[in-house]
Image (spheres, rainbow, N blue to C red):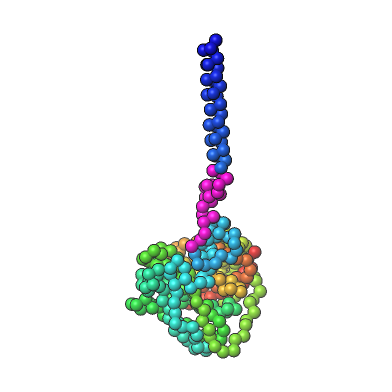
Amino acid sequence: MFASTRSTVRRRALAAAGTAAALALTLAACGSSNDSSSSMPGMDHGTKPSTSSSASTSPSMGDMPGMDHVAASNGLTDNKDGYRLTSKDTTLTAGKQAAYRFTVTGPDGKPVTAFGVDQTKRMHFYAIRSDLTGFQHIHPTMSADGTWTADLATLTPGSWRMFASFTPDSGSGKGTAFVLSRTVSVPGTASKTPLPAAGKTAEVDGYTVTVKGEPMAGMEHPMTVTVAKDGKPVADLQPYLDTYAHLTAFHEGDTAFAHLHPTTKVNGDHGGPELSFNAELPTSGNWRLFLQFQTGGTLHTAALTLNVG
């Protein structure tokens, strides 16, 4: 009888111990899952603070896939990740050509002299007036000490932003695309030119450029551009910068920069009439688009205003 009683007590003790262990495991699991959202796959990227010095357009944009890249690419800063755009030129003379000199320094403070090639060039340089007029796209030259010289065409009075787009070929930023900028003042009486109304077509040198697509702010969206002349599709576009057309955009108000990457591959000496791009515009509002294409050895630049929702 005593043996039976002892056996029963032992079984009850073991059962109680098992129940307690199971309960402990359950509570531990619950505590772990409630501790932080970073335990969920893919959540670390959204919750960790960005090391970029570029400000994001809204507090929550870093949580959206691909938005860190968009915000970091708007070019509205002269430094990022230790790389800095420096220049002694703060004013330029109106009404005549000017040489804008600048240097890109790396995290070690020394001028960067090794750059990767992007669309056949080691440096793409853009100048745009605050009212989004006077667009210039230049490929500057670099001296042995790392000083770049951009030969600008005539400038009108006002505030201008100078963008440098490049990819270091050495150092910590090797292979990373950067867009940095600085502003310069052109003294004189400045008159603001109203931004043309948003539309899907533009005329230049007898050509009609038509944009198709409805880009949404903060999202990558396909967009096509069609080139025609005298109502007929143009199929004699010549390669320009390793593509058949180069498309750049600037945002009204802050002159934020965006490069719309072409997806149409160059296949021979003649392209068109329809060209494809990946539009990735970070903020809503009006964007001024500049499409550059070449025919018969002549470079054409068409401009139109695109409203992004």
Q: How many marks?
A: 0
Tell whether position 43 is magenta: yes
Figure quadrant of the C terminus? bottom right
Residue 158 in the image: x percent, y percent? 57, 84
Q: Residue at x 52, y 67 (%)?
A: 54
Most extreme residue toward the left is: 144
Residue 107 visible within the image = yes
In this orientation, which residue lies closer to the viewer: 28 or 195? 28
Figure quadrant of the N terminus? top right
In this orientation, which residue lies closer to the viewer: 210 or 95? 95
Q: Vertically, is 68 above or below 5?
A: below
Q: Which span of residues is magenta-colored?
A: 32-51
Principal secondary structure, stretch drawn in magenta? helix
Residue 119 visible within the image = no
Residue 3 in the image: x percent, y percent? 51, 12
Most extreme residue toward the front is: 2
Q: Residue at x 56, y 89 (%)?
A: 188
Residue 302 in the image: x percent, y percent? 56, 74
Q: Vertically, is 5 above or below 136?
A: above
Tell whether position 97 is magenta: no
Left or right: residue 138 versus residue 308 is left
Q: Vertically, is 201 above or below 192?
A: above
In this orientation, which residue lies closer to the viewer: 73 or 63? 63
Q: Residue at x 55, y 59 (%)?
A: 62
Q: Residue at x 39, y 72 (%)?
A: 109
Left or right: residue 203 versus residue 267 is right
Residue 284 in the image: x percent, y percent? 62, 66
Res. 286 image quadrant: bottom right
Most extreme residue toward the right is: 197
